[in-house]
Amino acid sequence: MDFSWSDRQLELRDRMARFAEENLNENVVEDDVSGTFSRERWKACADFGVLGLNLPVEYGGQGEDIMTSVLAMEGFGYGCKDNSLPFAINSQIWSVQIAIQKFGTEEQKMKYLLPMCRGDIIGTLGITEMETGSDSYALKMRADKCDGGYVLNGRKCFITSAPISDVSIVFASTNPEYGRWGISAFMVEQGTKGFTATPVRDKMGMRTTLMGDFIFEDCLVPESARLGPEGIGMKMFTTTMESERGYIFSSLIGRMQRQLEEAVAWSQERKAFGKPIGQFQAVSHRLVGMKLRLETARMLLYKVAWLEQTGQPLLMEAALTKLYLSECFVESSMDSVRIHGARGYVTEFEVERDLRDGVGGLIFSGTSDIQRNIIARLLDEDV
C-alpha cells in the first residue's frame, strides 16, 4: 500500500481546508443551538466543487479518484468547525450519489447528479423504519405495482436531511414473499402527491443537519422512478452502505487533527501549580491517546480507499473503519473535554460540541454492534 501523496493532492486538501475555514465557520455556535441548516453554505460548497469530487465530469463532478476525494474531505473536516455540514455532504456523496451513479439509468444520472453537484437539489436515502432499526431488510413499507408505476405506502424514520431534501431514494418491498430479495428502490421527489416530510426531529448533536421522517400514503410514482430493476434493493443498499461506512467519516479525520492541535495548544497555555498542564502525566497521556487514535484511524480510512481504487474487496475494512473511527472520535472528544476542564464543558468554547456530535456516529450507518456482527461474520467465513 502506497499512501504517499502528490503535491497536487496535498494542495487540494489544503485548499479544501482554507475554503471551509474562510466560508463555513460563521455563527456555528448559534446555528447549533437553534438547529439551523444553511442552504447558502451548502450551495457555497457545491460551487467550490465539494459535492462532485468523485463523480465523473459528464455528471457535473470533478472526476477525482477515490483516494484523492477522501484526502480532500479530510481537509474539509479540518477547516469546518461544524461537524454537521461535512456529515450531511458526505452522506449525499457516498450513499445517494453512489447509488444513482451505479444503478441509475443515463436519464436518471443526468436528471439528478448534475443538480446535486451544483447544489440545486439535496438528496437523501430512506430505508430505516421505526419497527426495524438495525434489521434493515425487515421492511414494512410496500410498493405495489399498478398501471404505469407503483403505489407506495409506509413511513421512513430518522432520515438525514429529510426536512430539506428535494428527492429521496426510498426502499420498499415489491415482493414481500421474497423477503430481502423482494426489495426495490425508488426516486421520489418532494411535491409528489401522497409524499410528505415531517417536521425536524430535535437531537443531541449534529444539530445543523436536519433529521426527519417520510410518510407515504397512496403515493403514486411512475415506473421510471424505480432505481434499478425490481428486487435489487438489497444489493444496492449493501453497495451504498459499504461506501458510506468506509468514507462518511473521512472529514472526522481532519476534525480529529484540529482537535488534537487545539488540545496541545491549550495544554501549553494553561498553567496549574506553576507549570503548563501538558507537563502533567495525566494530561500528556490523554494527548498521546488522541494522537494514536488519529493516526491509526487515518490509516484504516486510507486503506479502504486504496482497496477500492485497486479493485479489491473492502466490506470488512469498511466496517472496521466505521466502527473504529466513530468510537475513536468519541473517546478523543471526551479527552479534549477533560483537558480543557470547565472550558471544555461550556458551549461557547466549542469543545463539547464534538462529543455531542460524535455520539451519533455510534448509531447511524449501522451501530457499532452491527459493525462488530459484520466483522465477526466475515472472520468466520475466512476460517
Image (cartoon, helix red, strand yellow):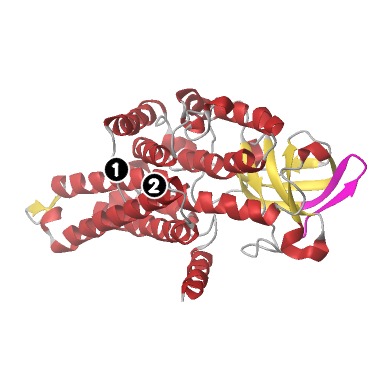
**Quick one: SS at disc 2?**
helix
What residue is pinned by disc 1? 258
Q: Is residue 294 something one can see in this rendering?
A: yes
Name the residue located 34 percent from the left edge and 30 percent from the top edge: 12
Above or below for 79 versus 234: above
Does 128 sit left or right of 367 as displayed? Answer: right
Q: Nearer the viewer, residue 327 or 267?
A: 327
Taking the magenta stretch, the answer to whether it contains residue 143 is yes
Q: Is residue 352 visible?
A: no
Q: Residue at x 47, y 28 (%)?
A: 62
Give the labeled residue for mark 2.
252
Quadrant of the rendered structure where residue 10 is?
top left
Where is residue 324 drawn, in percent x and y?
40, 60
Dot placed on the residue nearer the N-terminal end, 1 or 2: 2
Residue 375 lies, with reference to residue 250, above or below; the image says below
Q: Between residues 152 and 53, which one lies in front from this camera angle?
A: 53
Say whether residue 97 is left or right of residue 341.
Answer: right
